[in-house]
Amino acid sequence: MKIKPEHYSYIKHAIDALPKDKVAQHKAKELGKDKAKRFRWDLFHAARLSRFASDELYGYLNDDHIDTALKGIVKELGV
């Protein structure tokens, strides 16, 4: 994974801080064509990480790299 460990941790903690009941309700909606990818990115935006991405991540990553990190985070958190 290309993402810096400290950035991965920051994203993971931000997503983990989201209300679990709201996350489960949103996942149950099964939105989008690629439901898993849509869910990962919805979590990213719900955690208000867009500014962080602009300031920190897009200098050395693209969306594919961020999505790979999100896959790992979702798996680790069990959401």
Image: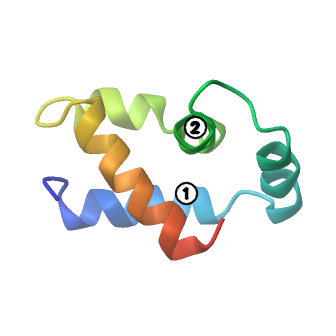
> Total of numbered circles in the picture?
2
Percent position of residue 24, x then y: 82, 57
Q: Tell me the CA gap for discs 1 and 2.
A: 8 Å
- Identify which amino acid the numbered label 1 is placed on: Ala
The residue lying toward the viewer, choosing from 14 and 29, is: 29
Asked which secondary structure carries label 2, the reply is loop
Q: Is residue 65 above or below residue 78?
A: above
Percent position of residue 59, x then y: 14, 30
Q: Disc 1 or 2, which lies upstream in sequence?
A: 1
The quarter of the image holding the N terminus is bottom left
**Colour option used:** rainbow
Q: Quadrant of residue 53?
A: top left
Q: Quadrant of residue 63?
A: top left
Percent position of residue 2, x then y: 13, 53
Percent position of residue 33, x then y: 61, 24
Q: Is residue 58 left or right of residue 38?
A: left
Label at residue 48: 2
Asked which secondary structure carries label 1, the reply is helix
